[in-house]
């Protein structure tokens, strides 16, 4: 895992590259390299994980191909053996070295051969071609800016703030962060900069603009011809292979163990394959209520598996956390899961250089109540008593627990007056409001990005629901939006702030191809008020884990932000209302309304946290409106 910047054009400046690279240096603390010729310049900061000696130095040049690479190719040993059988001789043990050789033999089709997480820029000095690519789900970032006859590439958006580029804030992206918690590729916080969508590559020749192509597609809907134990064993084999592949490293590897079924299953399967105890880590917030503390469950799993387990006791300062997260994000994600991910990465780095997380288990196996809500949405639209029940829930307000069942049920009932796609979007938004109520400026008509959003390929959410059915279609949508532009951004930026490589074993393309066609009844069952989630995964997990761990209620890896808002962050919210919020972009009345609702018992922590984080991020960059 690394960070890089590159410039293409006539006589690109290595000095400018060096300035830009100051924004990616924390991603690669082990080594630094540079390259420059008449048309291409690059600076690379390396976190050495595979082939850690100096022979893996980047930028790497093999004959007439120069490559900068961020990530890890998990099937690198097999690809290397294939190339060696074809007569290729290698000078290093780094997975980087296979890339120029694959390019020379297979061109852009090489990306379909890679199992891994990656952002790649290849410079063909003979053909004068730039080829860039990003992994299938977008675990590794790649930002691009075409401007004034030159093109910049970077591992972080903030790198362009240090270069000679004209940048204009994208106000629509600000709304996306506040309402949807994320900015979806290709959009970024700047109008002039795009993010290469996951699963895509692009080629650039002299006198042309980048031509983008998609190499990764979700599988065709085709019901799987297995059931019962046969299906269970088939999926289990794919899980074991996916988890085992992601242990590839020449440095120590650990596991972020929450005590939930996803991370616990990773630990259980890998413990069977390892002769040494696994390192596992968990965080606990001092003073938080029990429903925000998963350590007792994580410790139970660690004891069962014989892990070397450590719990970080966090005395978190809310204001310091805001500063740290705003600094770590090159563009904000308002998901509160960023905070525990940041803190656990900080705690784990002294012990390991690579960590595995359970990200993706919910989206593949049906871990969110909203998937069950989709299964019941059409069936309950004619429920006669729903408006009476909704009135009662509105009167009671939300619960203080991390699960907030009353709040979830209220949102589900509100969605019954919408079609399935509208309801799903409403369930995943932080707030229901229009532009004029929120912003002081008129809605901008920003230029449409020339590249497609990943879900647009399938006709957006509505198309996916029609293509796969409402449950698997919602999961497909989340894989390519919530996963790619929220959870993976959180994981990458929070871990790389500490020079730690974070891997997501569930996000294996072979496993995805299987799970997209597993029937929804193997994922979610029950009723919206009595859900049964991750049905198949829990059956698999029971082979290796205690029943009470597997079937305990879902809790989530969360920080007690809703409680902080009523204590440590109260003054911060009131100052925000009083002092031109977000540089004068947001109406104080809008924030006051959300704050009043929160104080009266309605959980508005998502939008309030988003406003505080966005405000701090903008302050650090001097944005004013």
Image (cartoon, rainbow, N blue to C red):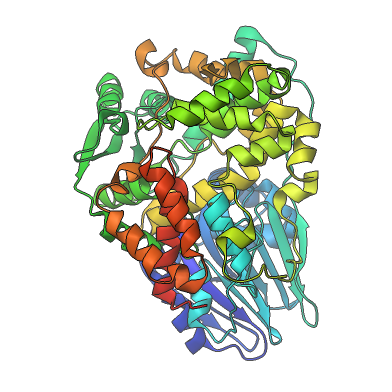
**Residue 94 visible:** yes
Q: Is residue 584 above or below residue 588?
A: below
Residue at the far bottom in the pictured view:
11
Residue sitting at 70 percent across and 39 percent down?
422
Q: Position of residue 119 (x, y in %)?
A: 58, 59
State the residue in front, 90 or 253: 253
Q: Is residue 517 above or below residue 44?
A: above
State the residue in front, 623 or 110: 623
- Label total for image: 0
State the residue in front, 25 or 52: 25
User: Residue 546 is drawn in which quadrant?
Assistant: top left
**Residue 519 visible:** no
User: Residue 612 is drawn in which quadrant?
Assistant: bottom left
Q: Position of residue 265 (x, y in %)?
A: 43, 25
Q: Position of residue 193 (x, y in %)?
A: 62, 72
State the residue in front, 385 or 246: 385
Q: Quadrant of the N terminus?
A: bottom left
Q: Is residue 278 above or below residue 130?
A: above
User: Residue 366 is drawn in which quadrant?
Assistant: top right
Residue sitting at 60 percent across and 84 percent down?
166
Residue sitting at 72 percent across and 78 percent down?
126
Q: Is residue 476 left or right of residue 550?
A: right
């Amino acid at each position: 895992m690394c960070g890089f910047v590159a410039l293409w054009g006539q006589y690109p400046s290595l000095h400018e590259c060096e300035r830009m690279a100051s924004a990616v240096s924390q991603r690669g603390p082990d080594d630094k390299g540079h390259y420059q010729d008449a048309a291409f310049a690059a600076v690379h900061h390396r976190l050495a994980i595979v082939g850690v000696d100096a022979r893996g130095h980047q930028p790497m040049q093999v004959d007439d191909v120069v490559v900068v690479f961020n990530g890890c190719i998990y099937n690198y040993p097999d690809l290397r053996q294939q190339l060696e059988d074809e007569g290729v001789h290698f000078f290093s043990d780094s997975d980087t070295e296979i890339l120029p050789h694959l390019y020379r033999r297979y061109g852009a089709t090489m990306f379909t051969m890679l199992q891994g997480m990656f952002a790649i820029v290849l410079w063909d000095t003979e053909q004068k071609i730039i080829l860039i690519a990003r992994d299938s789900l977008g675990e590794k970032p790649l930002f691009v800016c075409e401007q004034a006859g030159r093109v910049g590439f970077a591992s972080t958006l903030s790198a362009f703030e240090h270069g000679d580029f004209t940048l204009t804030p994208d106000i629509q992206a600000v709304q996306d962060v506040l309402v949807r918690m994320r900015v979806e590729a290709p959009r970024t916080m700047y109008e002039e900069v795009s993010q290469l969508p996951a699963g895509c590559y692009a080629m650039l020749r002299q006198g042309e603009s980048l031509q983008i192509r998609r190499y990764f597609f979700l599988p065709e809907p085709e019901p799987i011809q297995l059931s019962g134990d046969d299906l269970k064993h088939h999926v289990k084999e794919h899980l074991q292979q996916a988890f085992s592949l992601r242990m590839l490293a020449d440095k120590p590897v650990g596991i972020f163990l929450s005590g939930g079924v996803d991370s616990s299953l990773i630990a259980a399967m890998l413990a069977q394959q390892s002769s040494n105890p696994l390192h596992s880590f968990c965080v606990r917030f001092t003073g938080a209520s029990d429903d925000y503390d998963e350590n007792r469950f994580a410790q139970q799993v660690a004891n069962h598996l014989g892990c070397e387990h450590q719990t970080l006791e966090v005395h978190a300062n809310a204001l310091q956390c805001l500063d740290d997260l705003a600094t770590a994000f090159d563009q904000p994600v308002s998901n509160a899961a960023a905070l525990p991910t940041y803190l656990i990465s900080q705690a784990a780095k002294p012990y390991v250089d690579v960590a595995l997380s359970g990200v993706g288990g919910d989206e593949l196996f049906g871990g969110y109540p909203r998937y069950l809500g989709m299964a019941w949405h059409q069936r309950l639209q004619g429920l006669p008593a729903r408006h009476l029940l909704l009135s009662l829930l509105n009167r009671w307000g939300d619960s203080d627990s991390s699960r907030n069942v009353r709040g979830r049920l209220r949102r589900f009932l509100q969605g019954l007056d919408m079609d399935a796609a509208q309801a799903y979007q409403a369930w995943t938004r932080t707030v229901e409001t229009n532009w004029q109520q929120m912003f002081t400026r008129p809605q901008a008509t920003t230029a449409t990005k020339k590249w497609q959003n990943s879900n647009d390929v399938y006709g957006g959410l509505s198309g996916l629901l029609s293509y796969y059915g409402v449950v698997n279609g919602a999961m497909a949508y989340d894989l390519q939006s919530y996963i790619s532009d929220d959870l993976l951004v959180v994981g990458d930026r929070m871990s790389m702030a500490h020079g730690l490589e974070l891997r997501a074993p569930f996000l294996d393309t072979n496993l995805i191809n299987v799970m997209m066609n597993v029937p929804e009844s193997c994922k979610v069952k029950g009723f919206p008020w009595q859900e049964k989630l991750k049905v198949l995964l829990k059956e698999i997990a029971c082979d290796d884990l205690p029943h009470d761990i597997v079937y305990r209620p879902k809790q989530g890896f969360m920080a007690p932000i809703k409680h902080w808002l009523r204590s440590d962050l109260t003054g911060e919210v009131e100052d925000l209302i009083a002092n031109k919020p977000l540089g004068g972009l947001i109406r104080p009345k809008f924030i006051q309304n959300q704050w009043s609702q929160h104080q009266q018992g309605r959980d508005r922590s998502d939008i309030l946290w988003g406003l505080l984080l966005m405000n701090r991020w903008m302050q650090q960059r001097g944005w004013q409106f």
